[in-house]
Image (cartoon, helix red, strand yellow):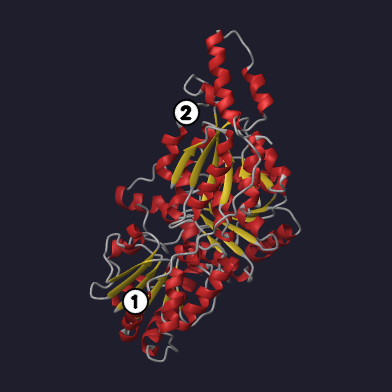
Amino acid sequence: MSGGDLVARVLESHGVRFLFTLCGGHISPILVGAKRCGIRVVDVRNEATAVFAADAIARLSGVPGVAAVTAGPGVTNSITALENARLAQSPVVLLGGAAPTALKGRGALQDIDQLALTSPHVKWATSVRRVRDLVPQLENAFRIARQGVPGPVFVECPVDLLYDESVVRMWYGTGAESSFRRWCLDRHLNRMFGGAQPGSLSTPVVPDPTAPAAQLVRRAARALERAERPVLLVGSQALLHPNPREAACALADAVTRLCIPVYLSGMARGLLGREHRCLFRHARKRALGEADLVILAGVPCDFRLDYGKHINRDATLISANRSATELRKNRRPTLGIWADPASFIMRLAARAPSDGSVRRGWLSRLREREEEREREIATVSRHPTEFVNPLFLLAAVDHMLDESSVLVLDGGDFAATASYVTLPRAPLASLDPGVFGTLGVGAGFALAAKLARPDADVWIIYGDGSAAYSLQEFDTYVRHGLPVIALVGNDAAWTQIARGQKEILDDDVGTVLRRTDYHRVAEGYGGKGFRIVRADQIEPTLRRAQETARSGVPVLVNAMIGTTDFRKGSISI
């Protein structure tokens, strides 16, 4: 077996169904080996997309996502997506091609120090030096990616470890080397291929999420029983699990039994469906400022909570987090629980269930604010703007979502607006850039979502700035038969940045775009494009887009939108 076949066998044994890649000579045996093992090789047009897709498939399936990129530029192009996966705590295995082992440091094609580049952005980085080490190193990579706080790992696979020994020896040939040089080269090859056997693979060990200590759960339960105005925040980390669907159902049941006000963020959006008596989306800052008990389940006190300042200083703060660092970031909790946040919430619900009657007044007060904000949004959505009002457009999208629809948000102002107006109907149906604020995630996330949920409508909500990062992947959708629906909110600007820049600096330099025909770009790649310029076109066009996608053709709707003050004062730095 070649080294590429050995790599593929490890992927197969760990339940990997998809290998995301952009081809390159350094990694060809991995791609061919994966295909032989029945793993679907999904080739994209940018290495970052491959890693974004691996990140998303890991979140949706619970199995580490795998991407393979070629040496040099292939690895450097993946760095942003790799860091996005690290901050999202997503288990990703990145396989990087590399120059031949005997030519390292001698000026070989695309030979750079890849470990120095990737190490700051991964949990573990290694370079394999012998064929016999490919299997154990890869198995170790999968274990590390999953354990503790999940995250990406990088495995460098030099090209001469991946091809058949006979081919590699032919490459090195006899040449004009001195006899000593020839002896050294033969010795190097003998060591590199020595002991390489197909062998048996280890049984993958899937680590169980760390359970909280019983005494800490008891303390939390007592604090909750005393609280009159509790608030629960559930973040993406609470959805990290080897079996995410099963875990999400159990977590949703636990949250329901607690019956306290809940705010969801990131991957947790959709956890409770659309209508739930304890689910709130608006006026979170005000609720946190009035609460006497705040529970953070996988949510750090970073900029999204103003570094903890949104939370009432006198409130009891309970934080459950897999990361010891994030557990105490910026604000030390009253009770810190270094464990899986979902496991903590489930155990807490078992000890302190409630029917909500004790806190009916608190729930009613928050519900009144929720309904008031919904009325404000509805009012703003009716304001006349140049072209289409973005809130009115997004409300139409929300109306079209069903229980299986998946939402992918990729952008600044338009995508952030969508998080207020559109609501996933089920758990694990929402993907967004996350804490890194990475534009360009859309195509890779949608690619993975459609592979994981082939029968679902997958919607990408693009800002016109972010759309240009990955429109080339319409070619990928067409080639692989993945009919997604992309909606571009086209206001000809980087509005998230322009709003504050113009107000403070009185200059829009660098923030102005064109109302580009993105729908024609999608058609050039083989998809179908539609254009919206008036409100009366919204519903029929979106219906046609949905029908077209369901017929097997990827679609892009280029919607000309106006501007509103809906997100004035939002964070851009």
- Pinpoint residue 496: horizontal percent, then vertical percent: 42, 53
Label 2: element kind: loop
Q: Mark yes or no: residue 74 visible.
A: yes
Displayed quadrant of residue 316: bottom left
- Pinpoint residue 448: horizontal percent, then vertical percent: 61, 54
Q: Amino acid at mark 1?
A: Gln
Q: Sequence-wise, which precedes: disc 1 or disc 2? A: 2
Relative placement, left or right, of 121 versus 290 is: right
Q: Residues within 10 Å of mark 1 (few under 14, many from 20)?
A: few
Q: Amino acid at mark 2?
A: Ile
Q: Which residue is the site of mark 1?
A: 215
* Distance CA(mark 1)–CA(mark 2): 51 Å
Q: Which mark is residue 333?
A: none
- Is 46 drawn above or below residue 39 in the view shown? above
Q: Are marks 1 and 2 in contact (CB under 8 Å)?
A: no
Q: Mark yes or no: residue 469 visible.
A: no
Label 1: element kind: helix
Residue furthest right as drawn: 551
> For the point 42% across and 64% down, which residue is it?
566
> For the point 34% across and 76% down, which residue is it?
215
Q: Which residue is the site of mark 2?
A: 112
Relative placement, left or right, of 520 versus 362 is: right
> For the point 30% across and 68% down, which residue is it?
310
- Pinpoint residue 88: horizontal percent, then vertical percent: 46, 55
